[in-house]
Image (cartoon, rainbow, N blue to C red):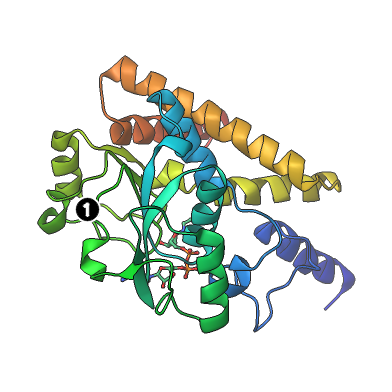
Amino acid sequence: MDSDLVRMEVLNALYSSGNPLRIRKTKSSSSTGEAAKASCCPNFRVVFAIEALLDDYGGSISKMKFAIQGFGNVGSWAAKLIHERGGKIVAVSAITGVVENPNGIDIPALLKHEESTNSLKGFNGGDAMDPNNLLIHECDVLISCALGGVLIKDNVADVKAKFVIEAANHPTDPEADKILSKKGVVVLLDIYANAGGVTVSYFKWVQNIQGFMWDEEKVNHELEKYLRRTSHEIKAMCSTHGCNLRMGTFTLGVSRVARATLLRGWEA
Ligand SMILES: NC(=O)c1ccc[n+]([C@@H]2O[C@H](COP(=O)([O-])OP(=O)(O)OC[C@H]3O[C@@H](n4cnc5c(N)ncnc54)[C@H](O)[C@@H]3O)[C@@H](O)[C@H]2O)c1
């Protein structure tokens, strides 16, 4: 390879991932799962979006009960940070088990238990329960952090939560969404609720271009600012068009892409 080609390969690798080249995935490290869960930087992404939503409804994390499906990278960080903010997590599930405790689960103890046993089973700070009941568990906020397509017409009529946070990609199917909407359940859409990950990737890209590294505090500050601003913009879109959060979020997203496309001269 000549030197120009080598340079192009290096730049491609650098800018396509947004990560500095030194941070390469190895066999023992992945962007999801256990390795990422043990990562040093708190993953505030979903929690910032939840805080912005609850603010709009006059609520706060510390006054709410949460049920969380999935205890991997997204779910375990959400649980840890909600617990630190005084939120009561009454049920948590993973493929390895389900724990419930109406008085609130001690999340640091559950994380320790999971780290040493690789399972949620056998945790003595709560009771085991049927995994099928997690989504319909008594709570104020249900956070789906596991899989797509889990909230379907067969189970959503029994959802007790007032807020559903789509931290997983596409957890709610369209029929289920209509039922939730009729029930008055507020659904925070995945393209906003879990957008913190790609927003931070954008920040990495920006820093790489500038050759300048932000500290963790600055990353979190910028992320919170973006998520709060977007939350207000979604709300404004909903009130302008008299629509629900899902339609407002899509309308905002599509209109931004359309505008950027026109501005860049990519019009057909
Ligand atoms: N990691 C990210 O940055 C990111 C960003 C945006 C969206 N997401 C989406 O969030 C979801 C979770 O991602 P992650 O990175 O935490 O994955 P992960 O693999 O780290 O964790 C998934 C968790 O879900 C649990 N799980 C799997 N099947 C289950 C089931 N049937 N019932 C209950 N729990 C079950 C697993 O045991 C595990 O605890 C995925 O839908 C992913 O696409 C992740």
* Image coords of residue 205 (percent x, y): 71, 50
Looking at the image, is 134 positioned above or below residue 235? below
Please give the name of the residue rendered at 80% of the width and 69% of the height, measured from the top-left corner. Answer: 5
Name the quarter where the N terminus is drawn: bottom right
Give the camera-side residue of 127 and 156: 127
Examine the rendering and report whether any part of residue 126 can be seen. Answer: yes
What residue did someone put label 1 on? 173
Examine the rendering and report whether any part of residue 95 can be seen. Answer: no
Looking at the image, is 10 positioned above or below residue 116? above
Which image quadrant shows ligand 1? Answer: bottom left
Looking at the image, is 116 positioned above or below residue 15? below
Answer with the quarter of the image where residue 68 lies: bottom left
* Image coords of residue 25 (percent x, y): 68, 74
SS at mark 1? loop
Query: In this rendering, would 77 be left or right of 24?
Result: left
Number of marks:
1
Give the camera-side residue of 261 and 140: 140
* Image coords of residue 163 (percent x, y): 31, 40
Please give the name of the residue rendered at 75% of the width and 42% of the height, measured from the top-left corner. Answer: 217
Query: In this rendering, would 37 be left or right of 100?
Result: right
Q: Residues within 10 Å of mark 1 (few under 14, many from 20)?
A: some
Give the camera-side residue of 15 and 164: 164
Q: Amino acid at mark 1?
A: Asp
Please give the name of the residue rendered at 26% of the width and 52% of the height, measured from the top-left corner. Answer: 172
